[in-house]
């Protein structure tokens, strides 16, 4: 009489489950890192888009004879309600982000007066990206990158002592 047992032994099944568990443990952190990096990249792209809109608005405001400094401000709270400052930007296709951009006349080290962005902050509520221009300079779009992103803790604070202590609020 032949004993034709078909199927897997318990040891074989446990070995397969152990291998799958190891693969999951290795894959999940990498996948989460990829998601976080893509969110950071999306925030940088939005910040650069807002920066470009601000540059365009600066030219428009200068042609209208607006006096400097100008602050472009738009704030979104946790409930989704918005507050605008005296000046806002015409934006399309951006998610619910808050921004505060300060435009000033700056006297450069060679004595020229330049109008440009001297302070730039954008946040999506979980992360914040921004820069403050050093003395006698203005910011360029190339100054904004992934290295400038800071996490916002549960109290709405960034790393103490950095240039981004205050989240954008419009008065």
Image: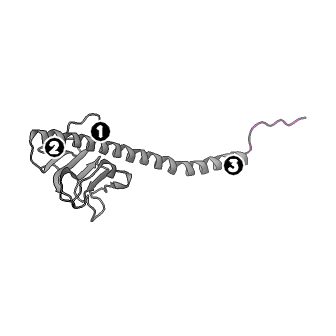
| Tag 3 and tag 2, C-beta contact below 8 Å | no
In terms of secondary structure, where does tag 1 sit? loop
Which stretch did the figure color magenta?
2-10
Q: Please rate how many residues cluster around mark 2, counting C-alpha atoms within 10 Å: few if below 14, some from 14 to 19, many from 20.
A: some
The residue beneath circle 2 is 83
Of residue 52 and residue 42, the one placed in the foreground of this image is 52
Asked if the stretch drawn in magenta spans residue 5, the answer is yes
Q: Please rate how many residues cluster around mark 3, counting C-alpha atoms within 10 Å: few if below 14, some from 14 to 19, many from 20.
A: few
The quadrant in which residue 59 appears is top left
Q: How many marks?
A: 3
Q: Position of residue 48 (x, y in %)?
A: 31, 44
The residue beneath circle 1 is 95
Distance Cα–Cα, label 2 vs label 1: 15 Å
| Tag 1 and tag 3, C-beta contact below 8 Å | no
Q: Position of residue 91 (x, y in %)?
A: 24, 36
Q: Residue at x 28, y 48 (%)?
A: 123
Q: Upstream in the sequence, badge 3 or badge 2?
A: 3
Distance Cα–Cα, label 1 vs label 3: 47 Å
Q: Position of residue 32 (x, y in %)?
A: 47, 48
Q: Which of labels 1 and 3 is toward the front? A: 1
In terms of secondary structure, where does tag 3 sit? helix
């Amino acid at each position: 009489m032949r004993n034709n047992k078909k199927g897997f032994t318990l040891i074989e099944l446990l070995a397969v489950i152990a291998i799958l568990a190891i693969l999951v443990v290795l894959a999940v952190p990498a996948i989460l890192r990829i998601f976080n990096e893509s969110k950071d990249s999306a925030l940088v792209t939005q910040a650069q888009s807002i920066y470009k809109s601000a540059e365009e608005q600066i030219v428009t405001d200068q042609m209208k004879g607006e006096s400097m400094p100008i602050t472009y401000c738009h704030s979104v709270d946790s409930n989704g309600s918005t507050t605008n400052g005296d000046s806002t930007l015409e934006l399309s296709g951006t998610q619910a982000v808050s921004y505060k951009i300060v435009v000033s006349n700056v006297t450069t080290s060679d004595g020229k007066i330049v109008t440009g962005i001297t302070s730039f902050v954008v946040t999506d509520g979980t992360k914040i990206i921004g820069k403050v221009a050093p003395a006698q300079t203005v910011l360029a779009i190339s100054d904004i990158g992934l290295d400038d992103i800071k996490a916002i803790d549960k109290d709405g604070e960034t790393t103490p002592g950095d240039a981004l202590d205050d989240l954008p609020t419009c008065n």
